[in-house]
Amino acid sequence: MNKIYFEDRQFEKIDYSENPLPKGDYERCTFLNCNFSSSDLSDLVFLECEFRDCNLSLAQINGTALRDVKFSNCKLLGLHFDQCNEFLFSIQFEKCILNLSSFYKRNLKKTTFSNCSLQEADFTQSDLTGSKFDRCDLLGATFMDCVLEKVDFRTAINYAFDPGQNRVKKARFSLEGIPGLLHQYAIEIE
């Protein structure tokens, strides 16, 4: 079966939960106010695409290629980014809800998460070198065996992880965030 190729197209206000997005490659396409909730986006290729005001909650993204893709003001509940195609994987998030999403073992070097909710997100064994969590809520997010070198947590809130179980060299934290790094010691900071 031949794949369809879409370039420089804009898709607006389409409900793909009822009518699936055609299988193919999408380059420099923009998706505006589309619903992909519980859709099967497996094995699609998105290159330099942007998703704005979209709902991708619980979408299946097995083998999906996300290469230089930006999500703005999107709802991405429970997405398994760990199942995406690893080749040239590159994503950015602004004002997104990523609660319960998984980034397990994902290379997220220099990824920006800006004004996002990442509650209960799983970053276990991810490489986040040089990434930034700008004004993000990390309540219950899991950081275990991660590379967090040079990660900027200064404006993030509600993070709690053991620096001894992650590589944190030159990571940046605010004074208010220090209790989240010491929670495992059950000490009181006043």
Image (cartoon, grey):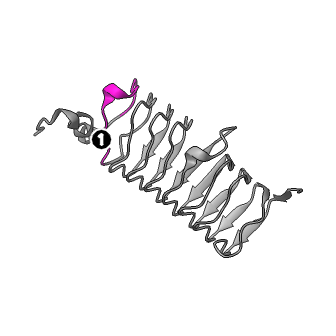
Q: Magenta stretch: dominant SS?
A: loop
Residue at 50 percent across and 31 percent down: it is: 129
Image quadrant assignment for residue 33:
bottom right
Residue 157 is situated, as x and y percent measured from the top left of the image, at: 32, 48
Image quadrant assignment for residue 181:
top left
Magenta region, residue range:
158-172
- According to the image, label 1 marks what residue? 160
Q: Nearer the viewer, residue 7 or 140?
A: 140
**Could you tell me which quadrant the C terminus lies in?**
top left
**Could you tell me which quadrant the N terminus lies in?**
bottom right
Q: Nearer the viewer, residue 68 or 105?
A: 105
Q: Is 123 inside the magenta-drawn segment?
A: no
Q: Is 163 inside the magenta-drawn segment?
A: yes
Residue at 63 percent across and 46 percent down: it is: 84
Using the image, determine if residue 169 lies above or below residue 108: above
Using the image, determine if residue 73 lies above or below residue 70: below
Q: Is residue 109 left or right of residue 49?
A: left
In this rendering, the count of numbered labels is 1
Residue 18 is situated, as x and y percent measured from the top left of the image, at: 66, 76
Residue 167 is situated, as x and y percent measured from the top left of the image, at: 41, 25
Q: Is residue 182 left or right of residue 104?
A: left
**Mark 1 neighbour class, 10 Å CA radius: few under 14, some 14 to 19, many 20 or more:** many
Disc 1 marks which amino acid?
Answer: Ala
Using the image, determine if residue 12 lies above or below residue 7: below
Using the image, determine if residue 142 lies above or below residue 37: above
Residue at 17 percent across and 32 percent down: it is: 185
Residue 148 is situated, as x and y percent measured from the top left of the image, at: 43, 31
